[in-house]
Image: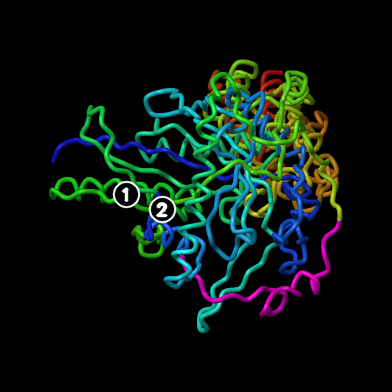
Amino acid sequence: MKAYDAVIGLEVHAQLLTSTKIFCGCSTKAGLPPNTSTCPVCTGMPGVLPVLNRKVVDFGIMLGLATGSRIAPRCIFARKNYFYPDLPKGYQITQYEHPLCEGGSILIETAQGVKRIGITRIHMEEDAGKTIHDEKAPLSYVDYNRSGVPLLEIVSEPDITSTDEAVAYLRELRQILMYLGICDGNMEEGSFRCDANVSVKPAGSARYGTRTELKNMNSFRNVQRALQYEIERHIEIIESGGEVVQETLLWDPSRGVTVSMRSKEESHDYRYFPEPDLVPVEIDSAWIDSVRSALPELPFARRERFIGQYGLPAYDAGVLTQTKAVADYYEECVRLLDRPKEISNWIMTEVMRALNEQGIPITELIVSPEMLTGLIALIDKGSISGSMAKEVFAEMVDTGESAGGIIEKKGIGQINDEEELRSLAREIIDAHPDEAHKYRSGKTGLLGFFVGMLMKATRGEANPKLASRIMKELLEE
Amino acid sequence: MKITDDEVLHVAALARIRLDDDEILSLRNDLDKILGYMDILSSVDTTGVNPTHHPLPLVNAMRDDREQGCQELADVLRNAPQHDNGYIVVPKVIG
């Protein structure tokens, strides 16, 4: 078989975290009873006029700046005409010519190093309603609560050449959206949706093959599986002398195949034209500057800074910056206690485990940065051992009590009382006169034996360093 | 005529409209006239004139992101020929 190159372009729809819809004042809250968050505008009643939500433009500019895109000084909306019951007006208000942003890019990490994936455009549009199909009757049920919820559509250049790169791009883009606080990034619930254009061509060829469009991939895993399946399907068709048909396909995750979605006569004919109900949006440099000044540090930059500033390995920096909340938690801990690597270890293991077990974000963890660093400080001081600290941490997660409180209450904690250890050590030496004699005649290797006895006598709670020092002192008296 | 029957039928299909032969002819005539008007517009020399996307000289008509209240469910459903538990019921569509 010849070698082939895959060419992948991705289209992401990100639902924006505004309070209200893009063109009316209805709430965007999810999970409301059907059709209770609707009004004449978002149900497409005749004679109504849409009015643009300023925050949608703000969010679009934020993403544009975060991806190094050009922000259009003037952009317009367009009507995309098609018939479907979830689209009450018979057209979707979107942007076609003159979108909000063009010409950006995102950096991703690949096995070959950092790669730049171009972003063709970012535009604003309204979401459609939701349709549920009846299993038995020839009926569909329509809920317009989602109709008019603002979306940003982010279109990549066909710069992506493998399924791994596709997933890396999506992860990075999702992370940026979440860092900016403009999208919750939930793929299963559809607030971060991905379509893909796929084609293959003989390795090194400049000519693109015929592409197909893939929909319905609602997890990173499904994106990977669907793209892999589709690339292999294209190669098989070409190898057997056939031709790939340009069409839209749905990924069927249960069967692991792609299925043709639209028949040919319904091929895209959207008859776009400028939306007469909305006036153009003009964005001056003052508007852009005010958005820019509120931009948070972005994931890629933060990762690099964590490596440089805290001396963390790249792996740690990657894990800690996966979400803004975890990165913020980490930095708050480091501010309180200058032990960057220890804190990183604790967050990556014990803290992450607790979050997974409870299924909560770090913002809801009962153990605050103050409490975690309090615990780590106790280990540093030698008050408790590392393994005891893990038990204490588990208790902190359950009860919300401070490390100090738990140690005191349970009577655990290392014995640091010199007098107590000294008297126990004396008893042990007195009980083992032969060994003590041997030690004193030069067999100093027996120190381990005596320290072991002392640890045993304290059920392992003696501070090992202190135990060893005291034993040595007494034996050498 | 500039417009063919097939084009009329294509546009009708996109709009989910069924047409009989008389209607096809009459719409063909109407669409033809409309395209004729467009030809007149197209004949104007617009060299150096920026495209007009909107007839009004307004820009940036926007609102703040504040909830303004919705419609009563009963009113939302009033225009729906069929509804069930708050959902609007339509003939089954898949695709």
For residue B3, which numbered disc appears in the image? 2
Query: x%, y% of residue B56?
Result: 74, 35
Q: Is residue A54 visible to us here?
A: yes
Q: Which mark is residue A246?
A: 1
Q: Residue at x 40, y 64 (%)?
A: A254
Query: Circle 1: is it few (<14), some (14-19), or many (20+) Cα within 10 Å?
Result: some
Query: Relative to A262, is A321 above or below?
Result: above
Q: Answer whether residue B85 is magenta in the image.
A: yes
Question: Is A253 positioned to the left or the right of A294 in the image?
Answer: left
Residue A214: percent from left, percent from top: 41, 51
Assign a secondary structure to mark 1. loop
Q: Which mark is residue A332?
A: none
Residue at left 33%, top 44%? A211
Dot 2, crowdedness within 10 Å: few (<14), some or many (≥20)? some
From the top left corner, tell me how far across and down residue A348 is, in percent: 60, 37
Residue drawn at 37 percent across, 25 percent down: A112
The amino acid at mark 2 is Ile
Magenta span covers which residues?
B69-95
Q: Nearer the viewer, residue A57 or A106?
A: A57
Question: Viewed as shown, does residue A465 lie left or right of A396?
Answer: left
Asked if residue B16 lies left or right of residue A252, the reply is right
- Assign the C terminus of chain A to one quadrant of the image: top right
Three-letter code, disc 1:
Gln
Report how far apart the C-alphas of labels 1 and 2 lie in the structure. 28 Å
In this picture, is A156 found above or below A129? above
Looking at the rendered image, the quarter that the N terminus of chain A falls into is top left
Q: Chain of mark 1?
A: A
Q: Quadrant of residue A431?
A: top right
